[in-house]
Amino acid sequence: MRIKVGLPLLGLLLALLLASLSGCDNPEPAEKGFAGLGGEASVFTPVVPGRVFSFPADHGPHDGFRIEWWYVTANLKDEQGREFGVQWTLFRSALKAVSEQPGWGNQTIWLGHAAVTSATAHHAAERYARGGVGQAGVGVAPFNAWIDDWRFSSQGSDALADLQLSARDKAFSYQLRLTSTRPLVLQGDKGFSQKSEQGQASYYYSQPFFQASGALIIDGKTYQVSGPAWLDREWSSQPLTANQTGWDWFSLHLDSGEQVMLYRMRQKDGAPYLTGSWIDAQGQTQLLHADDIILTPQDTANVAGRSMPVHWSIKIPGKHFDVTIKALNPNAWMDLRIPYWEGPVQFSGGTGYLEMTGY
């Protein structure tokens, strides 16, 4: 799931796949809450404040936690100024709170999502894999995340300084190089990213300063593209409550070099849980609370039979930030086994990505 819901947070949706992908394992009883992850998770490792992050180890998988994801989005242009969006996500979901094991006894399910978007087209694809048999995984020396022939891999000794990103399906493919010399960003309170007033949370860090370049193919036509890209990394065991129905997540690249991440966790009852971060051009972060942000849907579009808010007003008065955001392509519906909306957005003074789930 990037609020990805960085989450970016689409990783939460993996719970819906366990019954169909767990093979001969005895599935656990169905849990309550959105995507099954608002329920009891006491057998898994809890997310608590005060974690000390360690790199490059934290770029890799985390035994004991139920879900995690490696999530990349890129806002790209070709030489004629035409705009595109690219998404690449790898999700890891643990069936049991045990260490990784080789072979078919492995208790991990992997899921990959990839998509491309232009002003007139949107294509999405997915891949599934069982852990332990070499079909998918993440390594840290060197960094390499893959599922089938989709890859996000380091080209040097610094794990997240120079990487190749690739995916392909029938209607699209892309091969991009992502580079950055900027520091990683710990989201929330030093990497502890709270998702509800009850304390549900994830560990969450980002690299919002990537620059991407390479080739993108859509419907048989090749484009040479470049632009900013964003990586989100999150892991958790119970990031939502049973009352939370979905989220709206934004990652914004400002022309000033600053970055903004916001998410709104919608609830069945009560006001949404709203938070985010303001990241200056040097990578220093400021946690944003609900009273710092005015996030308002402005207009909707009928997408796949749903009313989707594809036009937003975002105000952060303390930063003198006041923009209206529109989807590059309102029909950026991820028509996958677990459907959701995700695509690039435009605004005066920058560009970004929006993910919306639970509609």
Image (cartoon, rainbow, N blue to C red):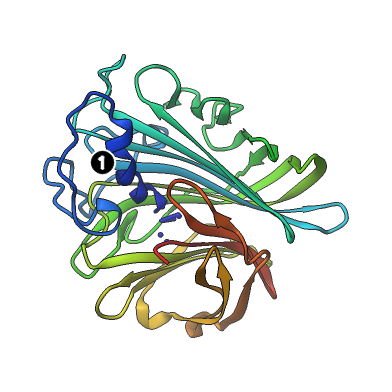
Q: Quadrant of residue 20?
A: top left
| Foreground residue among 49 and 354 | 354
Percent of width and height locating residue 252: 57, 64
Query: Going by the image, does 187 lie left or right of 25?
Result: right
Q: Is residue 256 visible?
A: no
Label 1 Cα neighbours within 10 Å, binned few <14 / some 14-19 / many ≥20: many
Query: Going by the image, does 305 lie left or right of 293?
Result: right
Task: Say which residue appears at 64% left-offset and 40% top-offset.
Answer: 178
Residue furthest toward the top?
103
Task: Say which residue appears at 52% left-offset and 67% top-offset.
Answer: 305
Residue furthest toward the right?
80
Q: Quadrant of residue 88?
A: top right
- The correct choice, above or below, for 102 with respect to 155 in the image is above
Q: Judging from the image, what secondary structure is the residue with disc 1 in? A: loop
Percent of width and height locating residue 197: 22, 70
| Foreground residue among 104 and 212 | 104
Residue furthest toward the left?
42
Task: Say which residue appears at 44% left-offset and 80% top-offset.
Answer: 293
Query: Going by the image, does 47 lie left or right of 315?
Result: left
- The correct choice, above or below, for 354 with respect to 348 in the image is above
> Which residue bears the numbered disc 1?
66
| Foreground residue among 182 and 113 | 113
Q: How many marks overall?
A: 1
- The correct choice, above or below, for 49 with respect to 289 in the image is above
**Three-letter code, disc 1:** Arg
| Foreground residue among 243 and 209 | 243
